[in-house]
């Protein structure tokens, strides 16, 4: 332990004696670590923002939707969820709680006082807000009597209000969807953007009104979200839904499902996998600079060995072992890399925070603790790996020859 402490003290003394050279040597590691931390912080912050937007939906919310492959799109024979499937979900599957069918309504767009917009228009029921965890900021949501009376009412998103330049509080205003007049009864809470696309450019209308607008000539694009009150029954209910919908769609036993029942957080999980892969690839690319920094450390340490040949000879003559010399030079290399790593972490996080602040609507950067620990550990490892050759060269010097070196 004493010899290790002495080696550490000697390594620190050597680095402090050549401050400028030590700092310049760490630049490669510093830049590499800063680049990795900045990339990871930006991607992780973005990923956390996406996950938080789906967090309130939880794992007990499932969605039934149709599945179409390339063959379906090529032939134009698309699978769609039917009203019969929704009725089965509502009335014939034990364990299903609230059901919120959603139907995409193909209208000509929205217009208000000479201004127009092309929002997403979908029809649903009053259960939607409880199933999806989305509620109105102003006014109210669609109620059951709206559906039963087929009232032309709508709940809009904040982006649609802004696009049509409606009043700050649009409740009570009339606007057109396609060729029909609708009254705004509520405006939903702002959701922001995902992948650059606004989640607030939409209008929600009563489900039966949407069916009437679509008519019998068009096959609607349907999906249905539903809750499972008991979290431990989610997988059981999922299987029940699959069996019931297969019967409803008259699928033969040897036929694959042409629909899927997925958890509300399935997108988040898939997104996390994609972002994880992207992070690893980007970090690997910018991490090449760490190797460049390691080579720089190795070169400087080789120069240092040459410069200190006589010093090494004196140390060996005074009784220093090969192990003592090896440890001292390895510690010097590790400390150089560690210094660059620590400064790089701070600089990288500051850079990520600055970039996130400069990009409009970009979520704050976030660096997980494990990334910091990994960056510090990897920096030290780079120093040790690339310091082995110079340290081994120093430890192998013959003391007599070293003392004669000029």
Image: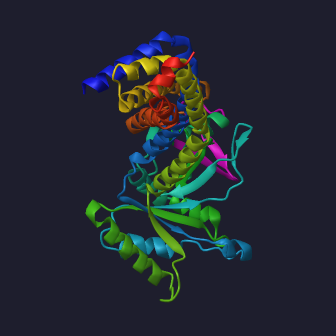
Quadrant in the picture for residue 216: bottom right
Q: Where is residue 323 in the image (x, y as percent from the top left)?
A: 36, 32
Foreground: 83 or 55? 55
Residue 266 appears in the picture as rendered: yes
Magenta stretch encompasses residue 184: yes
Foreground: 264 or 120? 264
Quadrant in the picture for residue 375: top left
Horizontal arrangement in the rendering, residue 258 relative to residue 2 (left or right): right
Residue 357 appears in the picture as rendered: no
Q: Which residue is most to the left?
A: 1
Quarter the C terminus occupies = top right
For image coordinates 52% across by 35% down, the residue present is 389
Read off the magenta span: 165-185
Quarter the N terminus occupies = top left
Foreground: 100 or 205? 100
Q: Where is residue 348 in the image (x, y as percent from the top left)?
A: 53, 27
């Amino acid at each position: 332990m004493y010899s290790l402490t002495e080696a550490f003290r000697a390594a620190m003394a050597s680095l402090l004696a050549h401050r400028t050279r030590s700092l310049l040597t760490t630049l490669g590691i510093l830049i590499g670590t800063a680049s990795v931390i900045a990339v990871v912080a930006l991607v992780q912050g973005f990923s956390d923002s996406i996950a938080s937007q789906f967090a309130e939906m939880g794992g007990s919310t499932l969605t039934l939707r149709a599945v179409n492959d390339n063959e379906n799109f090529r032939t134009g024979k698309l699978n769609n969820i039917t009203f019969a499937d929704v009725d089965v979900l509502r009335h014939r599957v034990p364990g299903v709680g609230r059901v919120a069918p959603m139907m995409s309504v193909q209208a000509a767009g929205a217009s208000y006082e000479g201004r127009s917009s092309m929002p997403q228009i979908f029809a649903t029921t009053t259960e939607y807000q409880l199933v999806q965890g989305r509620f109105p900021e102003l006014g109210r949501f669609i109620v059951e009597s709206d559906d039963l009376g087929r009232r032309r009412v709508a709940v809009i998103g904040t982006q649609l209000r802004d696009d049509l330049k409606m009043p700050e509080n649009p409740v009570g205003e009339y606007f057109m969807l396609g060729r029909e007049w609708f009254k705004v009864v509520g405006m939903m809470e702002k959701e922001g953007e995902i992948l650059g696309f606004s989640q607030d450019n939409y209008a929600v209308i009563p489900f039966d009104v949407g069916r009437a607008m679509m008519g019998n000539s068009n096959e609607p694009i349907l999906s249905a979200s539903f809750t499972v009150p008991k979290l431990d029954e989610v997988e059981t209910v999922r299987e029940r839904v699959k069996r019931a919908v297969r019967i409803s769609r008259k699928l033969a036993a040897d036929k694959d499902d042409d629909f899927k029942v997925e958890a509300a957080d399935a997108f988040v999980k898939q997104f996390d996998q994609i972002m994880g892969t992207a992070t690893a690839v980007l970090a690997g690319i910018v991490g090449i600079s760490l190797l460049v920094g390691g080579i720089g450390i190795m070169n400087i340490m080789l120069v240092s060995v040459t410069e200190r040949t006589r010093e090494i000879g004196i140390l060996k003559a005074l009784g220093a072992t090969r192990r003592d010399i090896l440890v001292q030079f390895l510690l010097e290399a590790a400390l150089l890399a560690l210094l660059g790593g620590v400064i790089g972490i701070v600089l990288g996080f500051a850079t990520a925070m600055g970039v996130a602040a400069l990009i409009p609507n970009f979520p704050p950067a976030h660096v997980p603790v494990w990334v910091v620990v990994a960056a510090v550990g990897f920096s030290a490892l780079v120093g040790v790996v690339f310091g082995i050759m110079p340290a081994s060269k120093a430890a192998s010097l013959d003391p007599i020859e070293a003392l004669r070196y000029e």
